[in-house]
Image (cartoon, rainbow, N blue to C red):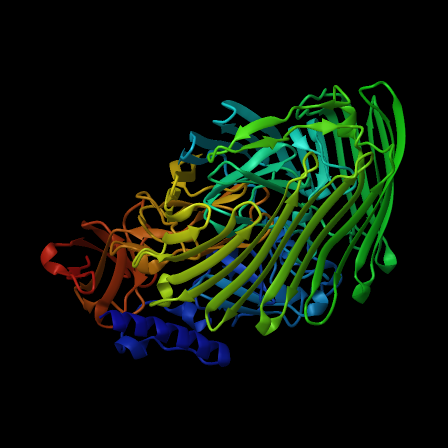
Amino acid sequence: MKVKIVCALVSLNLMGSAARAENDLQFNPAFLNGEGSNIADLSWVNAGGELPPGEYNINVYVNNNYAFTGNITFTVDKENANSEPAPCVTPEQMAAMGIDTAQAQGGTMPLTQKCVFLNHYFPGTQIDFDQKTLTVNISVPQRFMLNLPRGYVSPQSWESGITSAWFNYVINGANNQYQGESSADREQLFASLNSGVNLGAWRLRDFTTWTKENNELTHVQTWLQRDLPALRAQFYAGETYTSAQIFDSVGLRGVALSTDDNMLPASLSGYAPDIRGIARSNATVTVRQNGNIIYQTSVSAGEFVLKDLYPTASGGDLSVTITENDGSKTQYSVPFASVPNLVRAGQFKYSLGAGKFRPVSNQDSPAFMQGEMFLGWKYGLTFYGGTQLSQNYTGVALGVGQNMGSFGAYSLDLIHARSTLADGNSYNGDSVRVRYSKLINDVGTRLNFYSWRFSTEGFYTLSDTAYKGMSGGRSTQVTESDGTITTSYENVYDLRMSRKSKNQLLLSQPMENLGSVSLSWDQQTYWNTSKSTQGVQFSWNNTFKNVSVGVNFQRSTSLYDNQKDNIVSLSLSVPLGNPSFSTRARYSATQSDSNGATHSVGLSGYVPGKDNLYYSVNQRYSKQQQYGGDTALQYQGQWGDYNLGYSYSANSRNLSYGMSGGAVLHEDGLTLSQPLGNTNILVKAPGAANVEVRNHKGIKTDSRGYAVIPYATPYRVNRVVLDVTTAGNNVELDNAVINATPTDGALVRATIPTRVGLKAMLVIRNKNGVLPFGTVVSLMDAKNDSSSIVGDNGSLYLSGLPESGSVRAVWGTGNGKACTAKYQLNKRDYNAQTGLYSQEVICQ
């Protein structure tokens, strides 16, 4: 029966295709049901259409590039009597398609018409409509298109999202016990809460953290934000950070306005750093930016890579602290800076801010203002400058950058600063900085970033002038779990040792069959001391027939002591069994100056049948700590991420745990989720419970049919796809694919039409026999718009049905061309194999 319906629908499409091929040919419906008046009105098929006229919510592509999703009116072109229903588009929709209306045939578009047929004004335009996916692909000759960059998304399709409130939590903790010549118990606990409220284009945000070590809440920032598309900018009010492209980024409590590169096409914007490192044991990694903890997590011994950071500022290097399970710490910096300061020819970029300085430690909060501007010129040149002003500080900067093609790109800037410090004296100094980036050779070596900065002895920053004394902070003695004592120098400063020379390097080298190499180097020297700070991370990774090999090196030094720690690690992993489980046997060896050599073997992978539950088990040996081991579980669930780990050695025990997740409050209720980003998508598929979202591990709809997709990309097309194979027998998805283009910070609702109810294959008759082929039948239910078309022999497939109800059948106009039938679906009519009810009904 179901096959017959499919054949009938295919027949209708074939009829339409034939009508398009030969407009002078007309389809005679009498061929289907024989001669006589008992036939449905299929005049719209004669027009060649794949669907009757009306308004449809569809995905629109222009020249195979996505334009927008919206309501398009399909109607018959009255100027062409034999035409099929075609899209009639509005001027706003043409703008979203990137069509240059100034090139319209005749020179002008009619102002009185609400919508127009494109081929009237843009000859050669072709339209291809896919009824199955509700997608129309419009082919427009290139001469009628605006010259837009690759990846362009029309601002007309940007969505500010729905009114909502949400929060995002992260909790990580560890309990460490040591039993040796001395005993020590140490407990670590970190919690962070991101929360927000969205109202139209406005976003209210708050970020707060808490650590058990300090036993206090750290209020990182609260701010109000909205985008200004006309200015390609973001407006901020509250606590935020200044730009770091020229001056050092500082905390600002006030207002700011800056251009947003995310609004540019994908081919013209952005990057964010990964954090690499080596842990000698099960360790806690803490990441700070501008003195605030923005991330903390537990890692196993060996190399680690952090890719899911959520930085709070547009700049400011990241300070990384690795706290081992014995309490010892390793610290280094990762550059968080852009490539040379360049903008495209004709582009203008700016950043403005004014308000109070946000102190970090032992600082005042003077009023200040900052401005930066960039102008792209011909020959690949960019000219830029800026100023930073407060009562005790005046900084003026000028710079130039150039894209030199095969020779790379550079920027050169000079800052002159006049500062009054806590000792009451005035200082004058200059700082010159060179940035350079280049694809070095055809093999693919990329000098991602190199920066050299030299400052004269009298050069200080705005942050330096806010300190209450010329030196401050205090070192703290930390008793490690093995009884040794180390010194922590956090928040210690001495303005007499001002910064002198700074080098930063990021280098990557793909080597085809030989793997890839990456190098990060950061070094800072100071005036009036021979000491310096330095951090180096080097890694080489390769895969030989699914066998992965890696070598890593890490080195760090501190300004206030002579301690240096060099760590080298070797890793090897071999796949085992079913590739879908990602089960791998692993070996690693780590050599450090402080702990000697450690060897580890283990097994890791996904639990069979659970591709969101990851496990690892390791056994290790070191000369210092003898035998030890660790095990860990990581679960990526529907409502959050969870991890649990345990490790032991001869003298220590360590338990680590963590959880993170989010919750969204919207007009339809509360929806729990995995950890949220700043921009998210709310999936609404009413009644479709436990349906998986493709390409998002662990995410599926809740009992009401709602789910949240986190970390959506703002100002880009985000594709939402539900897995129809996971929908229940009583759920049918009309269109499981939808596109969303959120603005920054938006919660966009992606509504997937659903039919929830029973599915039935009916045979529908009236007094004259079965209803004619092509009869349109609709369920008489105001809450359900289920409808279908009668196939041959009166066969009819309907979904989303209640157990009993009535349907209305129409096969033409005039008297005797419509009737109503009642049905009652009983268990005896149900086929468990097909999931369908079968029944014959009488239409009266």
Quarter in which the C terminus is drawn: bottom left
Residue at image location 69% in from the left, 48% down from the top: 261
314 relative to 219, above or below: below
Residue at image location 45% in from the left, 55% down from the top: 599
| Residue 37 is at least partly visible in this image | no
Q: Nearer the viewer, residue 353 or 770?
A: 353
Horizontal relation, residue 455 to residue 228: left or right: right
Q: How many numbered badges does the structure rendering display? A: 0
Res 407 → quadrant: bottom right
Residue 704 pos. (x, y %): 32, 43
| Residue 694 is at least partly visible in this image | yes
Res 769 → quadrant: bottom left
Q: Which of 96 and 774 is in front in this view?
A: 96
Horizontal relation, residue 605 to residue 415: left or right: left
Res 153 → quadrant: bottom right
Q: Nearer the viewer, residue 805 or 149?
A: 149
Quarter in which the N terminus is drawn: bottom left
Horizontal relation, residue 306 to residue 445: left or right: left
Q: Nearer the viewer, residue 796 or 509?
A: 509
419 relative to 402, above or below: above
Horizontal relation, residue 647 to residue 568: left or right: left
Q: Which residue lies furthest to the left in this view?
A: 828
Residue 81 pos. (x, y %): 53, 70
Residue 232 pos. (x, y %): 70, 44
191 relative to 753, above or below: above
Residue at image location 40% in from the left, 58% down from the top: 601
Residue 284 pos. (x, y %): 49, 40
